[in-house]
Amino acid sequence: MNSSDFLSLQALSCLLLLLTGISNAELKSEEYQTYIVHMDSSHKPATFLTHESWHRFTLRSLSNPADGEGTFLYSYSHVMQGFSARLTPSQLAEIEKSPAHIGTYRESFGKLFTTHSPNKGLIAAGRKISTEYDYDSARDFFGHGTHTSSTAAGSYVLGANHFGYARGTARGVAPAAHVAMYKVLFATDTEESAATDVLAGMDQAIADGVDIMSLSLGFTQTPYFNDVIAIASLSAMEKNIFVVCAAGNDGAYNSTYNGAPWITTVGAGTLDRSFTATMTLENGLTFEGTSYFPQSIYIEDVPLYYGKSNGSKSICNYGALNRSEVHRKIVLCDNSTTIDVEGQKEELERVGAYAGIFMTDFSLLDPEDYSIPSIVLPTVSGALVREYVANVTAAKVKSMAFLSTNLGVKPAPQVAYFSSRGPDPITPGVLKPDILAPGVDVLAAIAPNKPFMELGKYDLTTDYALYSGTSMSAPHVAGVAALLKNIHPEWNPAAIRSALMTTAYTKDNTRTTMKNQMINLPATPLDFGAGHINPNKAMDPGLIYDMNVQDYVNFLCGLGYTAKQMSAVLRRNQWSCSQEPTDLNYPSITAIFTNKTSSPTTKTFSRVVTNVGDDDSVYQATIEIPKEMRIKVEPRTLSFTKKNQKQGFVISIDIDEDAPTVTYGYLKWIDQHNHTVSSPVVAIKF
C-alpha cells in the first residue's frame, strides 16, 4: 500500500510571545499590534533572492527600523505572499501605502473544537502555564493534537483503554499513512490559536507536499476575504491538497465554522457504544446508568441520602447540603433546570459525599468530570430511586459497580448535541456541514505523563483517552480521504469530497432517520449534511461531482466582493469573472426562498456528474421528497459508455407557501451495478 501524507494541525494553546522571544520589556505592547500583511509578489524587486528577504527589508525600511526588524514573525510563500509582524499604527500606514500591499489582517485567535478541557486542577490552583511547562518545540502539551493525529493514522495498539473503558485493539483510520504534525498552538489557559501560527503551519505543510490537511480548530465566522483558514485552504486546494475541518461545537443553531465550499466541513456523531455503571438498591431494584468513573471498585451497603424535605437539597444546589448529613453517603440529586450535573457534582465534592446519583435525560459531563463515584440515571429510572428513598427510613444502596462497556447501543449514530449546525452564516446556499463522522467518546492516544484528571488528592494519567468534539470527527474524514487518495491517486479534492458525501448514510441502526441527540427527534441535512461517512462505499461511488479552481472563482464572483476583497481570497491581482456566476457543482443542493413574495419562485440548478464506475452504466433518477416539496429533474436517465464521461442535468425545486422553514428530500441516481449516488436537496425559507 502506498501511504498518503496528511497534515494534522496540533491543537494546543498559543502564546505568541513564546514563539518570537519578545518580552514586554523589549516592546511597548500598547503601541504594537500583530498583523498579517498580504503582499503582491509581482512587485518583489529582482535583487531579492527570496520573498522572506524582501519582507524583512520592507520592515527594516520602516520608521524605527530596529523595532521593525525585531518584530518580524513569519514569512508566507504558499498560503499567500506576505508576512506577519508586530507593528505600530504608523508603521502599518507606511506599508499600506506601498503598491505591493494587497491587504492587512489583524491578529485573530481560534479555538479548539473539543469538549475536553485541560486539567482543571492546574488552572484552579493558579499554576501559570508558560515556558516552564511548554516551550517552542514540536512536543504536544495538552494532547489534543496527539489525539486527532492518532485517530486519523495511529498504529495498531493492543489493549488500549480509557481507565478500563473501551478496552480492545485500537488503530487509526489509515494506519499506513505518514503523519506530518505541525504545532500551531502553545500552552496557555485560554487554549486559543493565533492566526499567524496557523498560517505558518499550513504554509509549511504545503511546502512539504502533504496530500491531506486536517484542522480541528476554527476562527470566528467572517467573510472569506477575512478568513485565514478559508484563504489558506483555497491555496492548498489549488495544489491538489484535500482540506478537512471541524464544523465547530456551538450546537443546534446556524453556527457552522470553516464553511468555505473548498473545505470539507465535518459534524460529530455518536457511536453505538456506551459506558455504564450498575446500581442495586436494598429492595432489589437494579438500574444501569452512564458512568466514566475511572476505578474498578465495588460499593456495598452504603447509606443513601435524598433531601426530600428541602427543594434546594433535593437538587443538590450549591451550598445547600450539610456535611454532617451527607458525609460518606451516596447522595441522590434530583433533575433540575437551575443547576447542571457538573454543579451538583461540585456540591457533593464540597460536602464529602461518598458517591452521587444524578437524574437527567441529558448529561454534559465529560469523562474527566467523574472525580467521585457517580452514575447518571434517566429521569424515569431516577424517579423510581426517588420513590424508594422517600418511603423508607434508612435507605441503602446495596451495590454499585463500574467499568462496563456496552456495544450495539441503539439508536446510533445520532447527531451530537454540541455539533454545529447549518446553514452556514457566510454562504447559506452551500449546505454545511458536509458530512458526519464519529465525534463522541473517541478513544485515541494523548500526550503521556500529563495529568488527565483529578481523583481525590491524586492526579491520574493515561496514554489513551475518550475525547468528544468535532475536533475528533475531522480526523476520521482525513483518514478516509487518505485511503481514497491511495486508491484513486488521480482524484482531486472535489472528487474525494463528492465520493464521501454521495455514499453517506442517513439511517441509524434502528433503520430510521438519524436523530438529533439534544431533542431526540429526526435530524435534518442542516444537522448531518449528506449523512454519516461510509468509508467502504466511498471507495466506489459510481459518479462524482467534480470542480476546478475556476468554478470557485465563478462562485466568488457571485458574492459581490470588491476587487481588493477578491484579490485577498485568490491571492493574486488577476482573475476572470467574465462567465456568468453559476451555482457550484456541489454534491448537495440548497435552494434559498424568501418570504417577501406571496408565492415562492421555482429555483433551478445545473449539475454535471462524471462516471468513475463501470463502463456502459445507465443511471435512473429517484426522488424522495415530502408533500410540501416538488422536484423536477431533466433528463431522468443518464447513460455512460465509458469511464470519465460526463453528463449534465437540471433540477428544479419548488415548495408550498406554507412549507416549514426547512424542507428537504433526496435526489438519488441508481444504476444497474448497485451504485446509489445520493444528494440532499434542501429548501430554506428566510
Image: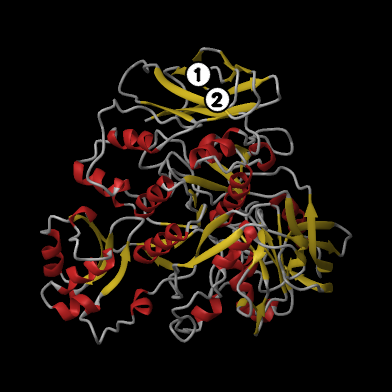
Q: Position of residue 549 (x, y in %)?
A: 38, 38
Q: Quadrant of residue 347?
A: bottom right
**In the structure shown, which secondary structural element does the residue marked by tag 2 occupy?**
strand
Tell which of 386 and 29 is nearer to you. Answer: 29
Tell which of 300 and 506 is nearer to you. Answer: 506
Residue at the (19%, 71%) spot, across then down: 57
Give the crowd class for mark 2: few <14, some 14-19, many >=20 residues within 10 Å: some
- The answer to whether residue 523 of the structure is visible from this angle is no
Instruction: Give the residue pinned by disc 1.
Output: 629
Tag 2: residue type? Gly
Left or right of 7: which side holds 361?
right
* Separation of residues labelled 2 and 1 (CA atoms): 8 Å
Left or right of 321: which side holds 229?
left
Give the total of numbered labels.
Answer: 2
Q: Position of residue 201 (x, y in %)?
A: 42, 64
Q: Quadrant of residue 559?
A: top left
**In the structure shown, which secondary structural element does the residue marked by tag 1 occupy?**
strand
Q: Quadrant of residue 642?
A: top right
Tag 1: residue type? Met
Q: Position of residue 351 (x, y in %)?
A: 63, 79
Tell which of 277 and 74 is nearer to you. Answer: 74
Residue at the (37%, 76%) spot, across then down: 19
Q: Position of residue 641 (x, y in %)?
A: 60, 18
Instruction: Give the residue pinned by disc 2.
Output: 665
Check if mark 2's residue and mark 1's residue have beta carbons within 8 Å.
Answer: yes
